[in-house]
Amino acid sequence: MNGVRFPDGKKDRQWRVALFQGVLPFKHSRVMPDILAGVTLAAMTIPQAMGYTKIAGMPVVTGLYTLLLPIVAFAVFGASRYLVVAADSATAVILAVGVSPLAAVASPKYVALVSMVALMTAGCLLVARLLRVGFLADFLSRTVLIGFLTGVGLQVSIAMLGEMLGITVRSTRTMGQLWTVLQGLPQLRWPTLAVSAGVVVVIFGSRRLALRLPGALLAVVGAIVLSAVADFAGHGIALIGPVTGGLPRLSLPDVSWGEMTALLPIAGACFVIIVAQSSATARAYAMRHHQSLNENRDLLGLCAADAAAGLSGTFVVNGSPTQTAMMETSGGSSQIAHLATAATVALVLLFLTETLRFLPICVLGAIVFVVAVRLVDVSGLRTLRRNSPTEFNLAVVTAAAVVFLGVEHGILLALVLSLLQHVRHGYRPNTAVILSDPDEHWRMEPVTPGKMIEPGLVMYWFGADLYYANANHFVEQAHLLVNQSPTPVRWLIIDAGAITTIDFSAGRALHELQQDLAKQGVVLALTRVSTNLREDLNRLELTKGIGTNRMFVSRRDCLAAYERANNIQPSIS
């Protein structure tokens, strides 16, 4: 389905808003499994979403609203087939800290302010889409994603221990939660632990019987029935309690311009978390299932989802790694599952909120705990440790940052570490001296003075684009090859096969190198010069100094020119 066209930098300066990309095309054989996965996802996420309302300071029913229109909006406008948009602990904490000083928690004014934050966040996401900042996801390497999901798995599993054991945990930090649980072990509630253990057994047992059997759904239904019949509340097992029913009403939040100014930093913080976390999660599952990723279209979907959240009186939604893992575990493979989740939530809001009050809170904790444990990528970490210890360390640091600092800081650190890793490769790239070989024709050897492809001819290969940070290293090695050579150097040839661009600072360094070598009677030449590099050399006014007759397309042409200039018998035919 196609819609309005907008500018997007293509040749015709147009692109089409293709709707339902996370749904179409679909296989008829997958429709029923996706619908079943959506119902299962609803059963698992409804209690969790209501739990997030406590963190955000919102009325309980607004947690259900996050699973209704926002999910439908992302399914319509987003592209990822797996990413689930839902309430999130990180953004919930930001809302609680930022909005609570402005109005009484859970009051109508508080709800209006929080809903406006969602609309303002949607505006930021729309600007990000127009500026096409989805490329930021490209800086999240597979290594970082392994560490990120592992960290999220550890963080969430620790956060669920309190609910599973019946221990009250008030800390929002992972280590604080773990310490509280350890201190509270003597007071754990055995009936609560028994129910939690039963849920875990049902989930794992159902998977052994049949991979697609909805163990979590069976656990939720069974727990509700047993809770009502056996009076779980009378045995000290905490229940969710009464939930207000009915569908949300669409309206603009009643917020003044002055209040919106105060909300802007809160919306900005939510925006950063949403872009980083959603990109990381969508990319991780796209890689896992060998699917293409359209980051900018997902930004549009997230924008629509948060706009729907703001208009329906609920709070900011985000791409959730936990709920996405739940959907995958339940057997979902497209946004059809998400639409089924929204339909299920609508039915619950209309007819089943009375039933939800019997659901034990520990059941939710046990379900989320199982999903979180599966996020810990032990196999991926083992492979990294075996194949690339350095990248294994990067994954471990990323996981530790998520656990100790939180998801939001962990993602930002992961982005920084990925960029630093890339910069490190460009700052000190691989270099070599090119030599000829009767059998292999060309070969690369370590940069060592005295190694020549012909008497008086040194060919130096630099394995990265030339820019301000690595220009000094480039010049130092060039001088090393000339000045410390045991025999005189006549020509220094730069093999520019890996140099596609050169910036102003590096251009000045190359110009100075050429002048220094000319004073020593050494010719500086370039070979394997690409069209883009030649344009940069022309723009930086370097072509005249080097000379067009000293810039070659191939190594063979360069070597032939040197032999002609020095009356040397050709060595390579």
Image: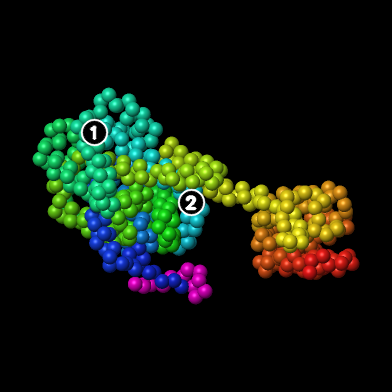
Left or right of 201? Residue 228 is left
Kind of element beneath mark 1:
helix
Query: 274 and 358: which one is in front?
Result: 358
- Residue 106 vertical position relative to residue 126 in the rendered view, above or below: above
Query: 418 and 172: which one is in front?
Result: 418
Q: Report, in whole angstroms, how far the alpha carbon at label 1 lies from the one at label 2.
A: 37 Å
Dot placed on the residue nearer the N-terminal end, 1 or 2:
2
The residue tagged 2 is 142
Q: Is residue 252 visible?
A: no
User: Residue at horizontal 13%, vertical 47%?
Assistant: 354
The residue tagged 1 is 193
Q: Position of residue 409 (x, y in %)?
A: 45, 42
User: Residue at horizontal 33%, vertical 60%?
Assistant: 334
Image quarter in which the N terminus is found = bottom left
Q: Position of residue 286 (x, y in %)?
A: 42, 57
Point out which mark residue 462 bears: none
Which portion, as a residue range, is magenta? Answer: 1-13
What type is the residue that disc 2 sits on?
Answer: Arg
Q: Which SS does the magenta portion mostly show?
A: loop
Label 1: how many Cα within 10 Å (few below 14, some 14–19, many 20+): many
Q: Residue furthest left?
A: 229
User: Residue at horizontal 46%, vertical 73%?
Assistant: 14
Q: Residue furthest front?
A: 439
User: Residue at horizontal 14%, vertical 47%?
Assistant: 355
